Image: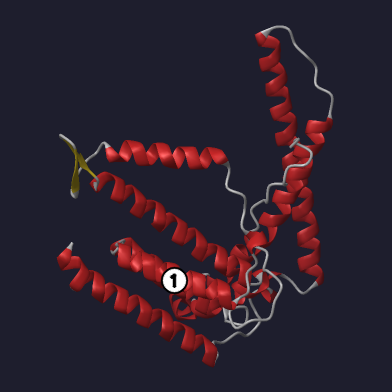
């Protein structure tokens, strides 16, 4: 199989909702932010196997309800698998309980289990963030943040400004990624000068890096100017967070399900399974 016929690698798709009209898509953006924040706090203080497994089940169930296709998952490079295998091997050398006997040698698997737990925790958190990205429109984030931060307004906290800044950053990030990919592809198509000396190759590499940085800054400024004109034409930055949004009945049901699942997992971790470990 030649390189031309190989399956094209899937890129990371973030900050772009997957098309669909499901119960997960219809959830209020503020509810999703609260769920992510609550799960983050839970896994920060209790990163055990039971909470990780419970959150993983919630992510899988949400993906099934949202009808997330497998095509949105990025292709994992082989180098990452090799790095994970190397990390697992080196973590095994740390030893620890439990210990298994391989002939006359005792091997402690505590370090390996800790490495696997941290890896599973990372995958679950990445999946949780990806689910929010794949089912939430960027335009819904700023009004949700403004609504959630309303109790801070009497303290003169600039909640609306924070919401607008967050919304603009989320809108600009995918556009800039696409622009940088185009710039890099165009740079790759340019003929390369072959330098015989190492010093010449270093100079050429530094010159190409400077050209790419200048082009990237120019593109970012042009996009910022276009976005500023669009915001002005639509009534100013205050309109970004001015849309009234409120949680509905399905949001309270989703919050209740998450609280029950996480509460049961935490109780099992602190009582039955925690004491047995």
Left or right of residue 134: residue 236: right
Q: Is residue 18 visible?
A: yes
Residue 117, position in %: x, y? 34, 54
Residue 216, position in %: x, y? 73, 41
Q: Give the quarter of the figure containing the C terminus.
A: bottom left
Q: Give the quarter of the figure containing the N terminus.
A: top right
Residue at 46% x, 75% y is: 34
Residue 273, position in %: x, y? 21, 68
Q: Extreme bottom residue here?
A: 249
- Camera-side residue of 267 and 105: 105
Mark 1 residue crowding within 10 angstroms, few (<14) / some (14–19) / many (20+): some
Res 142 → quadrant: bottom right
Residue at 43% x, 67% y is: 56
Residue 24, position in %: x, y? 58, 79
Name the residue carrying label 1.
Answer: 57
Residue at 48% x, 84% y is: 254
SS at badge 1:
helix
Q: Is residue 56 above or below residue 259?
A: above
Left or right of residue 256: residue 215: right
């Amino acid at each position: 199989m030649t390189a031309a016929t190989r399956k094209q690698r899937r890129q990371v798709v973030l900050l772009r909702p997957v098309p669909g009209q499901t119960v997960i898509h219809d959830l209020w953006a503020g509810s999703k932010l609260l769920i992510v924040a609550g799960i983050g706090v839970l896994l920060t203080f209790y990163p055990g196997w039971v909470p990780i497994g419970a959150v993983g089940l919630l992510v899988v169930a949400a993906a099934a309800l949202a009808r997330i296709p497998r095509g949105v998952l990025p292709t994992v490079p082989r180098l990452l698998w090799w790095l994970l295998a190397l990390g697992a091997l080196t973590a095994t050398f740390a030893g620890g309980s439990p210990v298994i006997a391989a002939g006359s040698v005792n091997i402690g698997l505590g370090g390996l289990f800790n490495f696997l737990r941290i890896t599973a925790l990372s995958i679950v958190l990445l999946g949780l963030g990806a689910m929010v990205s794949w089912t939430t429109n960027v335009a819904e984030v700023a009004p949700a943040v403004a609504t959630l931060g309303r109790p801070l307004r009497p303290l003169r906290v600039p909640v609306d400004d924070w919401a607008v800044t967050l919304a603009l950053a989320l809108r600009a990030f995918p556009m800039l990624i696409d622009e940088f990919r185009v710039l890099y592809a165009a740079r790759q198509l340019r003929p390369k000068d072959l330098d015989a000396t190492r010093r010449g190759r270093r100079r050429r590499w530094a010159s190409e890096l400077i050209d790419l940085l200048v082009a990237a800054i120019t593109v970012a400024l042009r996009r910022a100017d276009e976005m500023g004109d669009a915001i002005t034409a639509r009534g100013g930055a205050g309109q970004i967070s001015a849309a009234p949004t409120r949680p509905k009945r399905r949001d309270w049901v989703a919050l209740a399900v998450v609280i029950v699942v996480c509460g049961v997992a935490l109780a099992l971790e602190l009582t039955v399974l925690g004491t047995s470990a």
